[in-house]
Image (spheres, helix red, strand yellow):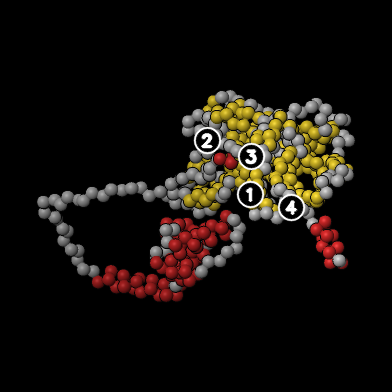
């Protein structure tokens, strides 16, 4: 009898077999864009395989939850599971039936419809998001400013917030400002500015920015009790439509610029460097400007990388030569959107005087002398004079003694070594042989030591081999 009582109690507590089922419901059937919606699957049965749901209404699932409930129906216990999926729909849709495996069998839920209405921003809303542009028509590469304004009504509570930037495909972001806060009495305003330029022509759209705000709310659980929770709501800005026009053929720069070039000196010694600083100022796509390095016959030109700081572009160059030379004007051609025309600006030419400049060798063309058929008339030999021979011998002997005592070739050798050890002279002598890998390595080190104040060392044995190989003295 005791065992019979335990069996009856066990049968009473274990849920009776009931028909398996899956029912789909929505927390709201009609919402505005930005509202959070919960999709619920109520599943009756014992052994269930949870369905994999990652997207609903073409929107990603933000969070999931599950709970189990046991209810008594007509004296029987009914066990069910509730699977919840939260998402933010952007448009109306029909959620198709979902298949769920229950107790080894596949059950199918019902389909549900969701209506999503466009959100209308009320003037007195707690949160207002706005996008503004300083231009509606721009040229490709032309800078313009986009400002994002977020207004939060005083007294509006936000537990948490997440900002989703607008989609900026087809644009370069040149700079982004730090957020700036201000107060107009009713709202706290946060301002964020972007400096941008369009990459292509045509009609281009900047999609709305999004701000997700979490606030506290109460809901009723399956037992009928009030439960505090967090409710998310999205606020969207307006979109921006821009008309982007192409630049004239052959032009890649747009804006308004000025250009200047300055030198540290206009008169130098042979093989001494002249340093030139080039500056371009203005508003435009400065980042598209290439190096200004020129080619000057007989002059070695070394350029540094372009440096860009907001509306200022700078480039340093060094010129080395042993003869006078002229640096031609640096030019810049661009399209001015304000004047609607192509403009060209240029610096002044720069004349450089070289002290003790090496004279330029004139090209002389020698012609082969024609042999004359006429007889060559020779002078008769003069009479042999023994006195002059003796005097010549004595003079030669004296010169030889002087040379042995003074040894002038040592002075010449010393002067020769000094000139080779001078980095600038050595650099100039090695430049004609820069196609040699070993020579190029030494040239790179010399350039950095001379023009960048580096303190690098090269292999002296390698240098000796290069000097010997090319007979450099």
Q: Kindly report the distance in space between the C-alpha atoms of the residues bearing marks 3 and 1.
A: 16 Å
Q: Which residue is mark 3?
A: 96
Q: Position of residue 130 (x, y in %)?
A: 73, 31
Q: Is residue 263 left or right of residue 27?
A: left
List the residue tagged with mark 2: 252
The residue singled out by tag 4 in the image is 17
- The quarter of the rendered structure image containing the N terminus is bottom right
- Going from N to C along the chain, the mark reached first, 3 or 2, is 3
Picture coordinates of residue 264 (x, y %)? Answer: 60, 46
Mark 2 falls on what kind of element? Answer: loop
Circle 1 sits on which residue?
Answer: 106
Helix, strand or loop at label 4? It is loop
The mark total stands at 4
Identify the mark at residue 29; answer none if there is no mark.
none
Q: Position of residue 309 (x, y in %)?
A: 65, 43
Residue nearer the viewer, 385 or 221: 221
Q: CA distance from mark 3 to mark 2?
A: 52 Å
Which residue is pictured at 79% across the width and 27% down the height?
A: 122
SS of the residue under disc 3: loop
When asked about the image quadrant of residue 288, the answer is top right
Mark 1 residue element: strand
Q: Separation of disc 4 and disc 2 at Cα?
A: 77 Å
């Amino acid at each position: 009898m005791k065992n019979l009582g335990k069996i009856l109690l066990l049968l009473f507590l274990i849920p009776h077999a009931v028909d398996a089922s899956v029912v789909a419901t929505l927390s709201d059937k009609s919402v505005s864009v930005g509202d959070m919606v919960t999709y619920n699957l109520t599943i009756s049965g014992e052994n269930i395989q949870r369905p994999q749901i990652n997207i609903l209404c073409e929107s990603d699932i933000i969070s999931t939850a599950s709970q189990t409930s046991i209810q008594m129906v007509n004296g029987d216990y009914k066990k069910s599971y509730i699977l919840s999926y939260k998402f933010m729909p952007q448009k109306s849709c029909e959620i198709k039936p979902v298949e769920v495996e229950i107790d080894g069998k596949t059950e199918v839920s019902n389909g549900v419809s969701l209506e999503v209405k466009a959100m209308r921003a009320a003037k007195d809303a707690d949160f207002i998001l706005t996008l503004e542009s300083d231009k509606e028509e721009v040229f490709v590469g032309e800078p313009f400013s986009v400002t994002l304004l977020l207004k939060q009504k005083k007294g509006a509570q936000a537990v948490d917030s997440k900002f989703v930037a607008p989609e900026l495909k087809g644009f370069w972001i040149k700079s982004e400002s730090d957020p700036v806060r201000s107060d107009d009495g009713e709202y706290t305003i946060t301002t964020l500015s972007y400096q941008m330029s369009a990459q292509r022509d045509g009609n281009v759209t900047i999609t709305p920015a999004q701000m997700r705000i979490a606030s506290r709310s109460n809901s009723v659980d399956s037992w009928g009790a009030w439960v505090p929770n967090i409710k998310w709501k999205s606020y969207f800005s307006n979109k921006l439509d821009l008309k982007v026009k192409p630049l004239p053929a052959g032009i890649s720069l747009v804006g308004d610029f000025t250009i200047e070039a300055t030198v540290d000196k206009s008169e130098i010694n042979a093989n001494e460097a002249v340093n030139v600083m080039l500056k371009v100022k203005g508003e435009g796509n400065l980042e598209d400007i290439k190096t200004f390095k020129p080619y000057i016959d007989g002059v070695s030109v070394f350029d540094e990388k372009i440096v860009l700081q907001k509306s200022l572009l700078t480039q340093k160059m060094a010129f080395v030569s042993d003869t006078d030379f002229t640096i031609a004007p640096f030019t810049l051609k661009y399209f001015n959107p304000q004047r609607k025309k192509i403009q060209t600006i240029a610096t002044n030419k720069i004349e450089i005087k070289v002290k003790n400049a090496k004279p330029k060798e004139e090209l002389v063309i020698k012609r082969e002398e024609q042999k004359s058929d006429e007889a060559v008339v020779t002078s008769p030999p003069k009479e042999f004079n023994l006195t002059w021979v003796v005097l010549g011998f004595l003079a030669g002997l004296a010169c030889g003694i002087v040379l042995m005592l003074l040894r002038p070739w040592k002075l010449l050798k010393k002067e020769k070594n000094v000139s080779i050890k001078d980095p600038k002279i050595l650099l100039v002598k090695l430049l004609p042989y820069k196609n040699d890998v070993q020579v190029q390595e030494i040239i790179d080190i010399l350039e950095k030591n001379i023009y960048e104040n580096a303190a690098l060392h090269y292999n002296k044995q390698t240098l000796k081999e290069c000097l010997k190989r090319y007979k450099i003295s």
